[in-house]
Amino acid sequence: MAISSIKDLSEHEGKTATLQGWVYNQRTSKKLIFTILRDGTGLCQCVTSIDDVSGNIWKKISSLTQESSLKLTGKVVKDDRSVGGYELHVTDIEIVNIAHDYPITPKEHGVEFLMDNRHLWLRSQHQWAAMQVRNEIIYSIHQFFQERGFIQMDAPIFTGNAAEGTTTLFETNYFDQPAYLTQSGQLYAEAMAMAHGKVYTFGPTFRAEKSKTRRHLTEFWMIEPEMVFYDLDMDMKLAEEMIAYIVQRVLSNKRSQLDILERDIAKLENVKAPFPRISYNDAVDLLKSDKTKNMLDEMEVSRKEEEVNLKKELEELQKEYGQAKKGRKYQIDRRSKEIRGLLEKIEEDLRNIPTWRESAEKFKWGEDFGGSDETLLTMQFDQPIMVHRYPAEVKAFYMKKDPDDNRLALAVDVLAPEGYGEIIGGSQREDDLDVLLKAIEKHNLPEEAFKWYLDLRRYGSVPHSGFGLGLERTVAWICGLEHVRETIPFPRLLGRLYP
């Protein structure tokens, strides 16, 4: 019997099929055993009746523990009430391995416990769905660029120079000379673009930031296109088209995974190009405006009312629980868990509102936007926003200055809505050799290390632009995840190198 996959069960309706995978969950009654099987493509309820199998098979299935590996054979039956819409009515079993006591159970576990067991946590439905969406995002990025005549090229991971400042470099000994783990593939992408016109790199990057926010990893993946003869406006247009393309692909192909993640689909359906574009100057004015202040005041009142109502509902559910029947208890448990999650979010907002208010009031022109500032700006839009023309002093040395205002860089940040912050940073690059030399000197960077980069301006310099998309932040936003640690199989965080 050929092995079938759960995602393809519809092709075998009414026929005998064999599934292989692991026990996700199992419950037993006197005459029926309900085994939820997972095989990496989905879940399937496999039903064993004591009347349909031998005593030996019944005994084997009864012995299964969570995450035991096995093969189950049976008839595929359509059932809209079951997970995935199909059941397997079991007639035979082959046990591959009986799992030891599995450490991750249906009860709630702390974050540190789950992170210590990340190698197992990846098997949970929530984490499985997030990784499925991540894969769809990666595939759609490649498809987007390949369809538009870009070629993928690879930048080195070991570098001899900084791309985004020297304070966040991981230094290593490279055959008795200092080298650094790359912060970005961009500088090398510029060189490759001069050969091929339109290129993109897709690889790991590293930042030694001692930050523990929900937006930061020390190792993450960046997608960095670079295009010759592109100005800032063309760069921005490409960026918004790419984001809209990715979101639509996920909505089309991973809707069931988004359902598992309980993602608000309506918010993603709003993501269509063109995005709102505001200058840094206008963004500062908005941040310090009465509109923002009133929004925070209204939010504080609303959150407090929600908190009172949810706590009251939770108290009433707890009173009902003792007298409730089994089915109702399940509903109460589920709703109670949902309420506790909502209360945690409300409490976080109430803690953050004073910080957001103070940050907005004290913000001064010329500063870079912090996480609080980005959150406040994006709260006022239902799409990603593009903030452009930042003060040159807070941007990288290679960014071209605005010819209409020398204080500003021709730079853009794309800020995702719902508080997810910057997912893209891009700019038009400085193409004048003399100006770039002065910028390197001003930033106290070693000219010798950038000799090859300066050659790009000596030999056939042209206007060019590019941007970098942070994959994990994009996954977090599209999936609606609270922390980027759930967006990558094995996250590297400050103090986290295991497993």
Image (cartoon, grey):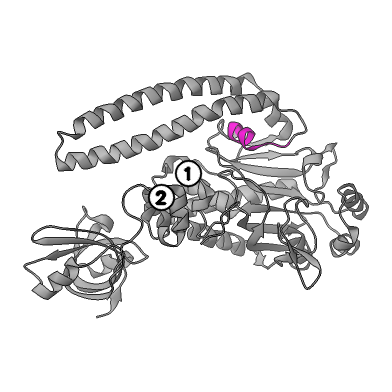
Q: Are marks 1 and 2 in contact (CB under 8 Å)?
A: yes
**Badge 1 is on which residue?**
268
Label annotation for residue 412: none
Residue 62 falls inside the magenta stretch = no
Q: Which residues are magenta?
A: 368-377
Residue appearing at x 81%, y 54% in the figure: 463
Q: Residues within 10 Å of mark 1 (few under 14, many from 20)?
A: many
Identify whether 354 is placed above or below 481: above
Q: Secondary structure at mark 2?
A: helix
Residue 375 falls inside the magenta stretch = yes
Identify whether 415 is placed above or below 380: below
Q: Residue 97 at what x, y percent from top left? A: 29, 73
Which is more toward the observer, 265 or 126? 126
Residue appearing at x 37%, y 35% in the figure: 340
The answer to whether one can see residue 21 in this image is yes
Q: Secondary structure at mark 1?
A: helix
Residue appearing at x 24%, y 70% in the figure: 12
- Chief secondary structure of the magenta portion: helix
Identify whether 181 is placed above or below 481: below
Q: Amino acid at mark 1?
A: Leu
* Alpha-carbon span between mark 1 and mark 2: 10 Å
**Residue 65 falls in which quadrant of the image?**
bottom left
The quadrant of the picture occupied by the N terminus is: bottom left
**Residue 27 falls in which quadrant of the image?**
bottom left
Q: Residue 170 at what x, y percent from top left? A: 71, 58
Q: Is residue 218 left or right of residue 18?
A: right
Comparing labels 1 and 2, the label whose residue is closer to the camera: 2
Q: Amino acid at mark 2?
A: Leu
Q: Earlier in the sequence, mark 1 or mark 2?
A: 2
Label annotation for residue 258: 2
